[in-house]
Structure formats: structure tokens, C-alpha cells
Amino acid sequence: MTTLSEMIPVMLLKTEQAKLNWELLGTSSFLTRIGSAVLEIGRRNDGIAFLNLRNADSVVVESVNYNSLPGGLDEKLNVLLDAARRRAYGTDQLLGSLKDQLDKL
């Protein structure tokens, strides 16, 4: 049986390949849709990173957080959160545009 935590490295890879489009959900959380599944990633009020899997009815069917993950996956969750944030805000595109503009000065 596959678990949500086991898929974190794949989610990170697909995010880095720009195959997952993350959207801003709140001030510190982001979401992406994959078929009927919705992934939500963010930070709780205490600063702990979390990842939720929601079904088509928006019910959380599985959830993991930084403290519940085995070694290695905890840091990958933080990297995934940062990658989701950068995709949602368009950070890389903005930095690329800024670099182009600075090069023209």
C-alpha cells in the first residue's frame, strides 16, 4: 500500500519539473489538483510543515507533518513546501525577468 509520505519525493520532482501547478490557498499554504485529488501543503500556526491529501469532497483522507515523517522525508517536505511556494508566487519567472532587466541596464 502506498502512503502519502512515500510520494513526497515524486511530488518534489514533478514540482521542480513544473508539472504540478501550485496555487496560493492562504498566507502560508498552497494547493494543487491531480485528477480528483487535491494536495494542500503549508505550515501550521506552530511553524510545522504539513501535507494533506483531500478527496473530491474536500475531506482530508491522509495527512503528514514534519514531525511524523521518517528521516530524510522530513527535509524533503520542507523543500517541497518551498518549491510549491515558489511555483505559486511565480518566483523563478520573476527573478528571470528581473535578471533580464538588470542585464539591459
Image: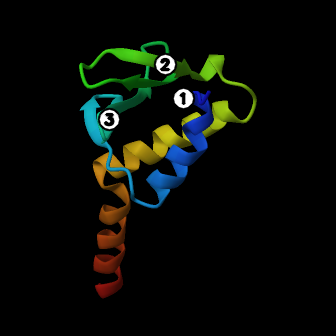
Residue 31 higher or lower than 94, as above or below? above
Residue displayed at 28% across by 78% down? 101
Secondary element type, mark 2: strand
1 and 2 marks in contact (CB < 8 Å):
yes
Sequence-wise, the earlier of marks 2 and 3 is: 3
Sequence-wise, the earlier of marks 3 and 1 is: 1
Q: Quadrant of the N terminus?
A: top right
> Who is closer to the viewer here, 94 or 62?
62
Name the amino acid, label 1.
Leu
Sequence-wise, the earlier of marks 1 and 2 is: 1
Q: Is 2 on the left or on the right of 93, as rendered? A: right
Q: Position of residue 23 (x, y in %)?
A: 27, 41
Q: Quadrant of residue 57?
A: top left
Q: Position of residue 25 (x, y in %)?
A: 26, 31
Residue displayed at 72% across by 25% down? 70
Q: Position of residue 76 (x, y in %)?
A: 62, 39
How crowded is the residue under tag 2: few (<14 C-alpha within 10 Å), some, or many (20+)? some
Question: How many numbered badges does the structure rendering display?
Answer: 3
Secondary element type, mark 1: loop
Identify residue for label 2.
Answer: 63
Query: Which residue is farthest bottom?
Result: 104
Which of discs 3 and 1 lies nearer the camera? The answer is 1
